[in-house]
Amino acid sequence: MTFAGAIFKTAIYLLKHQNIKRQCIRLEKQGKIAERDEIVQKYVPGWASYMIDLIGSKKAVINVKGTENIPKDGSVVFVANHQSYLDIPLIITGSQRVMGFIAKYEILRVPLLSDWMKIIQCVFLKRKSPHQSVLAMNKAVKTIKDGYSLVIFPEGHRSRCDEIKEFHHGSFKFAFRSEVPIVPVTIDGSFHLYEEHKKPMPGTVNLTFHPPIQTAGLTREQQNEIPDKVFNIIKADLPQAAASN
């Protein structure tokens, strides 16, 4: 299946579940946020599994380690390396926890998808607009303080390979302002499921949730050390790091 074909099937899937989306929007307008979130928690992991089967392969093997490291209460910031289009569905499936993510502002032009992204509390970022970037940062902080978790990919773009690119330190600012734990996540092999051959392929993905790193009460100097610390934790579980040891 081509990627365009996968997008088409995704649109059909979302259209079939329009009633769920409308219900979530209606509950939100009524101020029944807990009821909306309960529906989201039931529906979104199923969507994530569908996306893995569709864009990747039903024969994909997903090995998950470290879920005991995810705090059971409160919001967290998941920080992961970025290999594939499938990284968000993989993290949702592996953690069995729904979270929003930092997305390109342009996705707002895609109604079917962007509506659901708003429902799961995604934050939309216009990279070339300093003013909008500040607004997005404030939105991310509010989202986390409201009790929702977010995932960020500090590399900025998919690597499409098992190498990890340099982290943008600015990506961590809203985690520091929110003072919630950071959970590093290593994604190993997700690019095999689609990007490597530009078509769905069977493969093995190793997903590791590492122990949380506390951000509350840190000095500026301590905050500056966090991005490199998270980078090294994530990198240590990638094949390139193992090969060099």
Image (spheres, grey):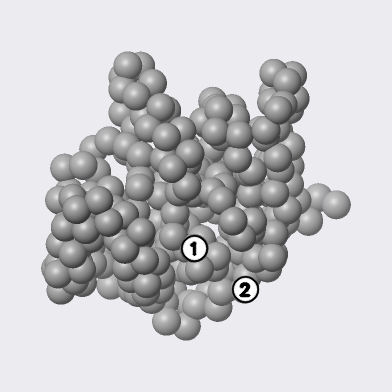
127 relative to 2 in the view: left or right: right
Residue assigned mark 1: 97
Residue in view at x 55 percent, y 28 percent: 177
Query: Which residue does the image show at 69% across and 23% down from the upper left?
Result: 224
Could you say which is closer to the camera, residue 20 or residue 153?
A: 20
Residue 136, which numbered label?
Answer: none
Identify the amino acid type marked 2: Asn
Going by the picture, which residue comes out furthest to the front?
A: 31
Residue 39 can be seen in this image? yes
Q: Are marks 2 and 1 in contact (CB under 8 Å)?
A: no
Q: At which x and y percent is residue 231?
A: 68, 40
Disc 2 from disc 1: Cα separation: 16 Å
Secondary structure beneath label 2: strand
Q: Amino acid at mark 1?
A: Arg
Q: Give neighbour class at mark 1: few <14, some 14-19, many 20+ (Cα, 10 Å).
A: some
Q: Secondary structure at mark 1?
A: loop
Position in image of residue 169 (x %, y %): 59, 27
- Mark 2 or mark 1, whichever is nearer to me: 1
Residue 2: x %, y % from top left: 27, 66
Q: Residues within 10 Å of mark 2 (few under 14, many from 20)?
A: few
Q: Determine whether, in the image, residue 133 is placed left or right of residue 196.
A: left
Q: Which residue is mark 2?
A: 63
Question: Which residue corresponds to the image point at 18% horizontal and 50% vertical from the top-left?
Answer: 29
Q: How many marks?
A: 2
Q: Residue furthest bottom?
A: 59
Q: In terms of image quadrants, where is residue 170?
A: top right
Q: Residue at x 69, y 65 (%)?
A: 68
